[in-house]
Image (cartoon, rainbow, N blue to C red):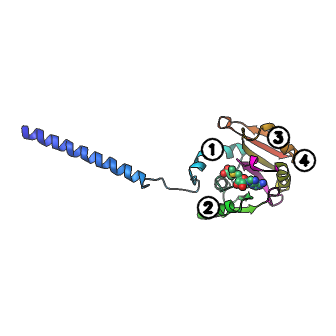
Amino acid sequence: MENYGYEEEASMYRKSLIIVILLIFFFVSAEAGIFRVQQNVLTPENANEARLNRLQPPDQVMDAIGIEPGMVVAEIGAGHGRYVVQIAVRVGENGKVYAEDIDAAALQHLEQRCAKWGLEHVETILGDVTKPKLPEDKLDVIFIISAYHHFSDPVALMKNARPSLKPDGIVAIGEWLNATSPEQIETEMKAAGYKLDRTETFLEKNNLYIYIFRIDQSR
Ligand SMILES: C[S@@+](CC[C@H](N)C(=O)[O-])C[C@H]1O[C@@H](n2cnc3c(N)ncnc32)[C@H](O)[C@@H]1O
């Protein structure tokens, strides 16, 4: 009987040791990235992109704007392509995305990002501060996110973007409330030849409104 007690104790000790070894293996592997989730085209490239995507959830934003397969969309101020990849997947190969920015290095990065994931329907356009150089009469949507407050002359830029919209096209601007007030955006966009269609406020808790404008045909 005494012998049996000793065996039982030894077996429990072995089991505990195995559990400790497995736990150490798990934590070391996780740290080394062995269990890291496979990356895909929509995976944020860094922690800042992940944070911004949590504040501006791409699917919810694109649903609110009405971005659909087959559409032709341009993003002004596309940066490193955080949203371009999202839009490119949503519009699909029958659609098209123009990624415009004034930062050549950012566009070069964006091109490499799209090439890596085979997004051949994305075209970059290097604009200048007031001339987005987008193709005329082609766009269903001009999209701008986290960029409007960076534009040094938004009225001139948006006036020059107007001819690129189809007559029933829209401009969708996602902008931080503490960066630009709704009144300022509406006033400037009116001066650029647009009228406000609606404002989507479902991300107000994240400090963001989405403004949908249409061409003001009377101007
Ligand atoms: C904060 S980043 C946002 C990038 C991207 N929209 C995003 O949310 O990940 C702002 C971008 O606006 C661009 N930008 C600033 N002024 C611009 C202008 N006049 N025309 C086009 N892009 C401009 C900057 O170069 C920069 O890439």
Task: Verify whether residue 149 appears in magenta.
Answer: yes
Q: Residue at x 42, y 55 (%)?
A: 32
Q: Nearer the viewer, mark 1 or mark 3?
A: 3
Q: Where does label 4 land, which residue? A: 217
Q: CA distance from mark 2 to mark 1?
A: 20 Å
Q: Residue at x 74, y 50 (%)?
A: 143
Tell me the element at label 3: helix
Residue 70 on image: x %, y %? 71, 56
Quadrant where the N terminus sits is top left
For marks 4 and 1 on the same chain, the one whose residue lies earlier in the sequence: 1
For marks 2 and 3 on the same chain, the one whose residue lies earlier in the sequence: 2
In the image, taking residue 193 as reference, residue 74 lies left or right, namely left
For marks 1 and 3 on the same chain, the one whose residue lies earlier in the sequence: 1
Tell me the element at label 4: loop
* Marks 2 & 1, CB-CB < 8 Å contact: no
| Residue nearest the observer in this picture, 127 or 193 | 127
Q: Which amino acid type corresponds to the residue marked 3 in the rendered image?
A: Glu
Q: Which residues are magenta?
A: 128-153
| Residue nearest the observer in this picture, 214 or 51 | 51
Q: Where does label 1 land, which residue? A: 57
In the image, taking residue 51 as reference, residue 195 lies left or right, namely right
* Callout count: 4
Q: Where does label 3 land, which residue? A: 186
Q: Which amino acid type corresponds to the residue marked 2 in the rendered image?
A: Arg
Residue 78, can we see it? no
Q: Nearer the viewer, mark 4 or mark 2?
A: 2
Residue 13 on image: x %, y %? 20, 43
